[in-house]
Image: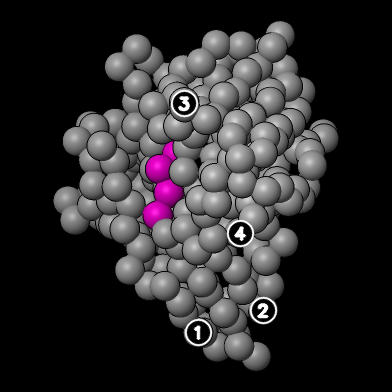
Amino acid sequence: AQKITQTQPGMFVQEKEAVTLDCTYDTSDQSYGLFWYKQPSSGEMIFLIYQGSYDEQNATEGRYSLNFQKARKSANLVISASQLGDSAMYFCAMRGVKSGGGADGLTFGKGTHLIIQP
Amino acid sequence: EAGVAQSPRYKIIEKRQSVAFWCNPISGHATLYWYQQILGQGPKLLIQFQNNGVVDDSQLPKDRFSAERLKGVDSTLKIQPAKLEDSAVYLCASSDRPFMAYEQYFGPGTRLTVT
């Protein structure tokens, strides 16, 4: 079974500061993927970044980077130079590999509500 | 490219009534997922389709929930009879391939309120 833990229910950050959202995971799979999604108040889920368990380099996508520490089973999201539009719920998620091939659906954490203050 | 479409966007029903949700994935996407998101929680996978076959329905409450994906395109999720605890947003997502790195694209969701 897979489990995602996000220990920060809410965070307040000043605009233009960097912010780190914590995520730890638990799985017995050797091959897995880690994702971060953003969910604004409008409700849609927006994909931000992906990290494969065998990727040696941390993933980056624009202002988003994923701090992947495999031994510690953590996959923290770092947002550099935060903007007011970054205010939203952020979900960490993972998926494993099915025994017959292909990948599972996503297992999500409970999310972190990020509020960027001017 | 059109995104994942869902309807209705909102639905209010009384407990013990039936309800159905519809999802049309991105054109050409073979993999389709239904998630349930209860207020204050992350989405939970209910069922995963590959074309018109069920790949994973281990978390689907089969005594009241059913889903189908006829012809491997659009999908319907049904609840019969509904309970108060079914109040949630039901999200549909699709993916080009059912492999690890392939992004899942989410629809806007259907917000269900059971009274």
Residues beneath discs 4 and 1 located on the same chain: yes
Q: Is A111 displayed left or right of B35 in the figure?
A: left
- What secondary structure is found at the residue carrying circle 4? strand
Say which mark, if any, is on residue B62.
3
Q: Is residue A44 above or below residue A31?
A: below
Which residue in the protein does label 4 denote? A39
Where is residue A114 drawn, in percent x and y?
Answer: 53, 74
Is circle 4 on the same chain as circle 3?
no
Which quadrant of the rendered structure holds the N terminus of chain A? Answer: top left
- Callouts 2 and 1 close, C-beta under 8 Å: no
**Is residue A107 in the magenta section?**
yes
Give the foreground label among 2 and 1.
1
Residue B88 in view in this figure: no
First-in-chain label (4 vs 1) = 1
Q: Residue at x 23, y 32 (%)?
A: A29
At numbered mark 1, what does the secondary structure look like: helix, strand or loop? Answer: strand
Q: Which residue is mark 1?
A: A12
Does the CB distance between marks 4 and 1 fall below 8 Å?
no
In the displayed image of the protein, which residue is found farthest to the right? B2
- The magenta segment is A105-109
Of badges 3 and 1, the one in the foreground is 3
User: Which label sits on residue A84?
Assistant: 2
Q: CA distance from mark 2 to mark 1?
A: 11 Å
What percent of the width, then of the height, locates residue A62?
58, 59
